[in-house]
Amino acid sequence: MVIQSKVQRFALFACAAIVLMVGQPALAQLAPLPEAWRTALTKVGTDPPPKALAADAHFVRSDESAHWVAYGHLKDLGGVLLGVGTDPNYLMAGWMKADLVLLVDFDQVVADVHALYLLALRHAETADAFVQLWSAKGAPKFAEFVAAMPDPAARKRAQAALKLARHVIWDRLVTLRKDYKAQKVPMAFSEADQYAHVRDLALKDRIWAWRGDLTGAATMTGVQAALKAIGREVSVFYITNAEAYFDYTQQARKNLRDLPYGDKSIVLRTQGVPSKAAETADGHYRYMVQNGRDFAAWMALKRTTSAKAICWSRKPTKVQGFYTIPGPPPPKALKSK
């Protein structure tokens, strides 16, 4: 029998009390962005503005509502997130514990909205404070943060984006908090550790956004070059439903084929099928995951002119509206390179 002294017993009691009071250890903070990474990312260019916007609208918030179906696939995956669109990227960055987030959208307003997200993340210490900045009550303080931006051109764009998007994003954030609480899935706009990680990404300059076209010749090739220069691979590529708005031209396929995908990388896409609500996760979209290298194999095929060819091979999971796309293209398709 081991007899403990009073001092030993007190020490054990104190340690137990600290665990009860503090809970799990805080998430490890990220290191500042390496200068070599900054140099490489600064070289990424922007594509020309589009002649017309998809659906003639600025998508300053997502209309997809069930990204939670992919939570188990993204959880703790780590690495680089490459994403299109707005708010879902921040949820995914928290889930996967990304250490670098690269955001691309061909609408300059969406890029300016990301500038607003970064401002809010850097100034708001908690998820509650972050969400409140987008409210009518928080608007004056948010406007002060924007007014202090040093670059005149970026400041002017951010002010216009705030005026256009603040109330829409506020509504989106409130809705997301309610929906994810119901699903019992943690996410950055409500859960402390998730928010702390995403905020740390912003504070360490590990979130970058560009006006970039997936079919263009500048931004995506620049992202490829930057990732190669810093020796990183894409862990998650969130392409949302962007594929519905363009054909896979030779340049588009090259842009997506030549991204450096990791072995366990995931491409997450959505496909709008509102007329087939029983096949959707949110009444509008199917959600699909695919291995990144399998996706690259599809992009190597000249006959892959749209995402429809890829999506035909989807396999349903036990979750309504959530599908996997298994394996590379079938051998018959491979012969058509």
Image (spheres, rainbow, N blue to C red):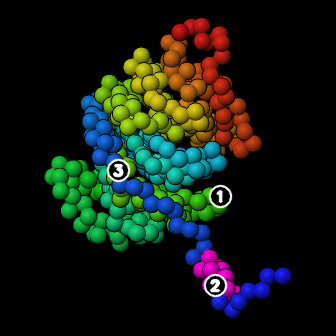
Position of residue 277 in the picture relative to residue 28 (left or right): right
Q: CA distance from mark 3 to mark 2?
A: 39 Å
Secondary element at image label 2? helix
Q: Residue at x 66, y 41 (%)?
A: 321
Identify residue for label 3. Answer: 33
Identify residue for label 2. Answer: 11
Q: CA distance from mark 1 to mark 3?
A: 34 Å
Q: Earlier in the sequence, mark 2 or mark 1?
A: 2
Is residue 56 in view from this perspective?
Answer: no
Position of residue 123 in the picture relative to residue 259 (left or right): left
> Where does the magenta region start and end?
8-21
- The kind of residue on which mark 2 rests is Ala
The residue at the far bottom in this view is: 6
- Give the percent coordinates (x, y) of residue 123: 34, 66
Query: Is residue 136 placed above or below 242 in the rendered structure?
Result: below
Mark count: 3
Identify residue for label 1. Answer: 183
Q: Residue at x 32, y 24 (%)?
A: 217
Q: Viewer-proximal residue, 25 or 172?
A: 25
- The kind of residue on which mark 1 rests is Gln
Q: CA distance from mark 2 to mark 1?
A: 40 Å
Secondary element at image label 1? helix
Q: Kindly check if marks 1 and 3 are in contact, taking CB atoms under 8 A apart as contact.
A: no
Label 1, residues with CA under 10 Å away: few <14, some 14-19, many ≥20: few
Q: Earlier in the sequence, mark 1 or mark 3?
A: 3
